[in-house]
Amino acid sequence: MRLLLDTHALLWWLDGDRKLPARVRRRIADPHSTIFVSAASAWEITTKWRIGKLGGADAVARDVNGAIVKQGFTPLDISIRHAEHAGRLATDHRDPFDRILIAQAQLEGLPIATNDQVFDDFGVERFW
């Protein structure tokens, strides 16, 4: 199965946090799964760390790409197509990180591991 991780799911996975449901942990750990991490998550992690809203994530924030590669995850770049789609999403949701993740999930046909129910408003398949 292919699965896109929301930023909090990535951080909880890396930290071994039990807030990440067992079924999500099993899917991420499954060697047959392809796990995608968006460039938007790298942007979100480093931005929130820089402004002091993400304490405890120093090592990840200093090398997001290294953390992704070490886990064997697949980086997902943000394309012009993704950005256009995110900008055109019709609802009032203002979080730019979520908007990119929603666009990527929609355009790439990826379910997303997230506890954020706002993704349901966009018809994105949530795996939680």
Image: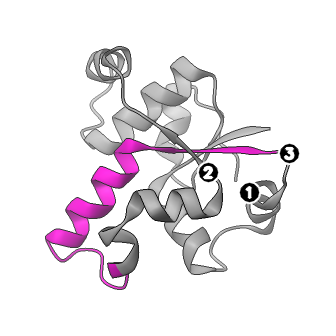
* Quarter occupied by residue 78: top left
Q: Amino acid at mark 3?
A: His
Vertical placement of residue 64 versus 31, above or below: below
Q: State which region is magenta.
A: 33-58
Q: Is there CB contact under 8 Å for labels 3 and 1?
A: no
The residue carrying mark 2 is 73
Disc sitting over residue 28 in the figure = 1
* Measured Cα–Cα span from mark 2 to mark 1: 9 Å
Vertical placement of residue 100 versus 109, above or below: below
* Quarter occupied by residue 70: bottom right
All told, the count of numbered labels is 3
Q: Dot 3 lies on which element? A: loop
Q: Dot 2 lies on which element? A: loop
Query: In the rendering, at what x and y percent does residue 106 appear?
Result: 54, 22
| Outermost residue to the left | 51
Q: Amino acid at mark 1?
A: Ile
